Amino acid sequence: MRRVRLLPVVALAFAAIASALPAAAQEEHRATDAQRLRRYKGAIAKYERALKLLEKNDRDRALDALAVSIEEMPDFPDSHFLRARLLYGGKEYSRALEEVVAARAAYERTADLRAEMQADRRKALTERLRAKDAAISEQSGRLAKASADQRQQIERLVARLQGERFDIERELHEHRPDPQGVPARYSSLHGNVLLRLGRDAEAIERYEEALKSDPAWGEAANNLASLYHLAGKNERALEIVIQAEKLGAPLHPELKKSIEAALARRP
């Protein structure tokens, strides 16, 4: 096959330390967190501009937008990640490696900001859900005293409110926290870059990491199985392929056949 290169005790201790800090120091700490969050949100807007430019195939201006995003918030991970992807696509593998490493580090350093934003989002959805419930209850209470014409109008309004409530509830249930560790897409791209640089052993580690984070990440499964296949570790390669297939991950159509053929040729 052609080689594809592609904490209760801690909390209490922290509380004790925080309470010992001077009030001014605590206020400064809160202000710093607020500034970080503000810069993080500003970086998101500039990152989204880069995405829109990429939709227009304007790579150069997208890179400029990413540079502005990173200037706004040097620890904004997705801007580093997207820049790594673009550099990788341009075959600038050494620079891409620097960016994907920066993305991983930034992702870990900004976990607290994402957690705060997710908590705020969940709170906002919960409040919207309560408001819809109150509105539905109010309109339903009007039905008893309504005329026939009014009843039809109220029933239509209640039906619309219930539909909106369903959409909010679905969004609330689909809202999930960040995965433990860096995302699979980060680890997989990291593996791709290392592979291009001839650092296969390190690439394997990153693909394994990606599949630990998301077992259905097809790119990582395909490349990892291919590397094990080329190294003659076909049992492990087949294991990866079978697991990925069960999860519906996209794989090279000939990969499994090649692995099974290699296993069949064993004495």
Image: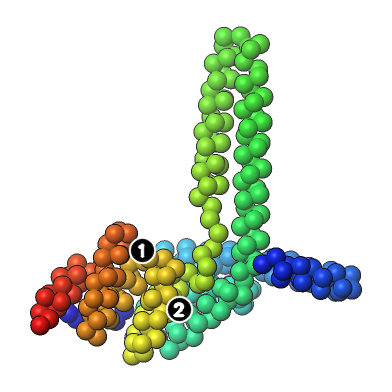
* Residue sitting nearer the eye, 175 or 9: 9
Which residue in the protein does label 1 denote?
216
Say which quadrant the N terminus sits in. Answer: bottom left
Residue 135 coordinates in the image, percent (x, y): 65, 29
- Answer with left or right where residue 60 lies relative to residue 201: right
Which residue in the protein does label 2 denote?
84
- Answer with left or right where residue 226 lies relative to residue 108: left
Badge 1 amino acid: Ala
* Residue sitting nearer the eye, 90 or 244: 244
Tag count in the figure?
A: 2
Element marked by disc 2: helix
Residue 153 coordinates in the image, percent (x, y): 56, 18
Q: Is residue 14 above or below residue 139?
A: below
Is residue 112 visible in this depiction of the protein? yes
Quadrant of the image occupied by residue 206:
bottom left
What is the crowding at mark 2: few (fewer than 14 residues within 10 Å), some, or many (at least 20)? many
